Amino acid sequence: MSPSTSPLLVRRGAFGALARAIPLAGLLFAGSLACSSDPDGSSAGSGGSGTATSGGAPATGSGASTTSGAGSATGTGGSGGGATTGSGATSSAGEGGASASTSATSGGSGGGGGAPDPGFQPCPATGPCKVLPLGDSITFGLGFDGGYRVELFRLALQDDHEITFTGTQQKNGPAMVDGVTFPRNHEGISGQTIQQIAGRVPSPALNEMPHIVLLHAGTNDMVQGANGADTRLAALLDELIAEAPDALIVVSNIIPLPPAANAVNTFNATIPAMVEERAAAGAHIVFADQFTGFPTSELGDMVHPNQAGYTRMARVWYEAIEGYLR
């Protein structure tokens, strides 16, 4: 796939639109799945008990739209929803219901994505590019063992890119993918809010310095206290940029969370401009749209993706980083 035509790439000064969300309120704390502890002895929330079906193959297409340059976009939120700014897409939410994007088709619309910055190459010339999956139970892969990391690894293999995953949390996922040993590392802890995720930066999350960071955070904030979530995310981004200045930071909006659709819309609307501001200041940071086009049929328990949903997420991440891989 040609980086110059990727619809999800958002390089310095160029942005995509909304993304998907995955909160975890009751589901993240009820059940016995994925309860991890940080090295300092503090325990994380336990994973939800809902199981996800792996039904139907995911729709083709990335489900996001971007424009090269800081395009202006409008978005309509339901009660409490906010309009997107600085993005290249529109999103709407019904009043009190799940956001309209959750039932959107996966194609999306928009201009061509920005090309990779030729002056920046986070991955080494030889050896695997180290990718840090950072977040909560969605990053852990609740509902499908290995989560989006399985398909992301497969996509890289298919294009002859060498990647590995870093992280200190409970390893999960298959032993092999397409005949190659699957790196089962990650930094996803069920139930964690943005502030709790920030508490793992720089240590232990960056103990093994990654070349690329994939950040999906904020789902738990939507149900534990959405006010100020954008400020907390901005602080986390600044910390990542300061602690890993040579890494590519890929931040997404969160996938749909139907029980908190309005809060998700409001939070997601702030992220493109947040990323754009830091990219314009010289940070190696891009936006990935995990929200647009994510259907509720690909949420196994209305919080976590099923296999098709995780496959969709993998494609979005891959389109964001593929131009940087060797």
Image (tube, rainbow, N blue to C red):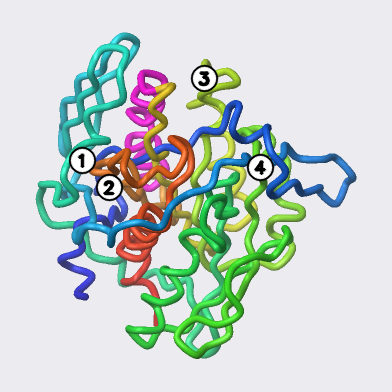
Q: Distance of mark 4 from mark 3, alpha carbons?
A: 20 Å
308 magenta-colored: no
Q: Nearer the viewer, mark 1 or mark 3?
A: 3
Q: Which residue is mark 3?
A: 226
Segment tinted magenta in the rendering = 261-280
Q: Of the residues shown, which amino acid type is indicated by label 2? A: Gly
Residue at position x 57%, y 79% in the image: 182
- The quadrant of the picture occupied by the C terminus is bottom left
Q: Of the residues shown, which amino acid type is indicated by label 3? A: Ala
**C-beta proximity under 8 Å, tags 2 and 1:** yes
Q: Which residue is mark 4?
A: 47
- The quadrant of the picture occupied by the N terminus is bottom left
Q: Is residue 225 left or right of residue 294?
A: right
Whole-percent x and y of residue 268? 37, 31
Q: Distance of mark 2 from mark 3, alpha carbons?
A: 27 Å
Residue at position x 30%, y 18% in the image: 97
Q: Of the residues shown, which amino acid type is indicated by label 4? A: Gly
Q: Nearer the viewer, mark 2 or mark 4?
A: 4
Q: Which residue is mark 1?
A: 70
| Mark positioned earlier in the residue sequence (2 or 1) | 2
Whole-percent x and y of residue 255? 39, 40
**C-beta proximity under 8 Å, tags 2 and 4:** no
